[in-house]
Image (cartoon, rainbow, N blue to C red):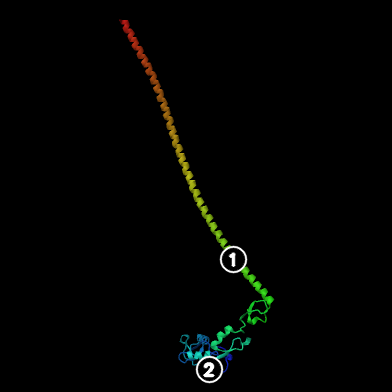
Amino acid sequence: MGINIDRFVGDVDSNFICSICNDVLEDPLQAPMCEHAFCKLCISQWLNTNHSCPLDRERLTIGDLRPVSRILRSFISRLALTCNNQIHGCPAIVALEELETHLLECSFDPKRLVSCSSGCGITICFGERANHNCARSLRLEMKETLERVEKANEDKMSKILGINANLVQKLERVEKANKDKMSKILGINANLVKKLERVEKENEDKMSKILGINANLVQKLERVEKANDDILKIETVLVKLDTESATLKQVNTNFEK
């Protein structure tokens, strides 16, 4: 859409007017053949449903459009017009090319932020000065500040609760891992106990066998010792008998003589 023609001072050349919106050209583009110029937004909307120039009906597409000449842009930029804030009391008349800079500094801009001159110090829009109530604004500002603080605290608490929840989950995983490790350790210990019991049982069996063998050996040894004693007794008797026999023989010999 173009710039409202009623804001311009004096007559505006028809070459600077968009034939679609009938206002002064804004971001102008032109058809390459007929060189008719239009506002960028106006001609774009037109070509969404039409495929020809609005004036001479020559075939035209969005891709065909070209920027207008530098001279035309220069003439348009020098046109004088009233400030956007004229309705709010601004008397300024500036060149179109200077309008943007003026609006940044215009003291009549209703959206311009100013400090309340009544003493509360709250920043308000210039256009809201007449309706500004210090007490109400202070209450509102305090309420908004309190809401922001509460919201910030809620966010922090949510983060803390989230962190705590994560810590609880990690702790549960650690406890579960420790329980699993302990179960494995207990299982290993149980196996070791069973193996130890088997070894002890085997040792007891071996010891029993050894003790049994030793008992047999003791019995055999006792029998051998008894047999040896018997042999010694027999040998003693035999020696005695031999001695007696020799004595008898000697007696007989003496007797025969």
Q: Which residue lies furthest to the left in this view?
A: 257
* Quadrant of the drawing holding the N terminus: bottom right
Rate crowding at label 2 as few (under 14), some (14 to 19) or many (20 or more) other CA atoms within 10 Å: few
Tell me where residue 231 appears, x and y as whole percent.
38, 20
Q: Is residue 210 visible?
A: yes
Position of residue 188 relative to residue 226, above or below, is below
Q: Can residue 1 be seen in this view?
A: no
Residue drawn where x is 53% and y is 56% of the image: 174
Tell me where residue 100 appears, x and y as whole percent.
55, 85
Give whichever of 25, 51 is nearer the camera.
25
Q: Is residue 143 left or right of residue 211?
A: right
Q: Is residue 239 left or right of residue 49?
A: left
Q: What residue type is labelled 2?
A: Ser
Q: How far apart are marks 2 and 1 (CA)?
A: 63 Å
Question: In the rendered image, which residue does mark 2 sit on?
Answer: 14
Q: Which amino acid does label 1 sit on?
A: Lys
Position of residue 35 relative to residue 198, above or below, is below
For discs 2 and 1, the disc positioned in front in the rendered view: 1
* Quadrant of the drawing holding the C terminus: top left
Tell me where residue 5 appears, x and y as whole percent.
57, 91
Question: In the rendered image, which residue does mark 1 sit on?
Answer: 156
Quarter of the figure with residue 120: bottom right
Which sits earlier in the primary sequence, circle 2 or circle 1?
A: 2
Give whichever of 124, 176 is nearer the camera.
124
Give whichever of 238, 119 is nearer the camera.
119
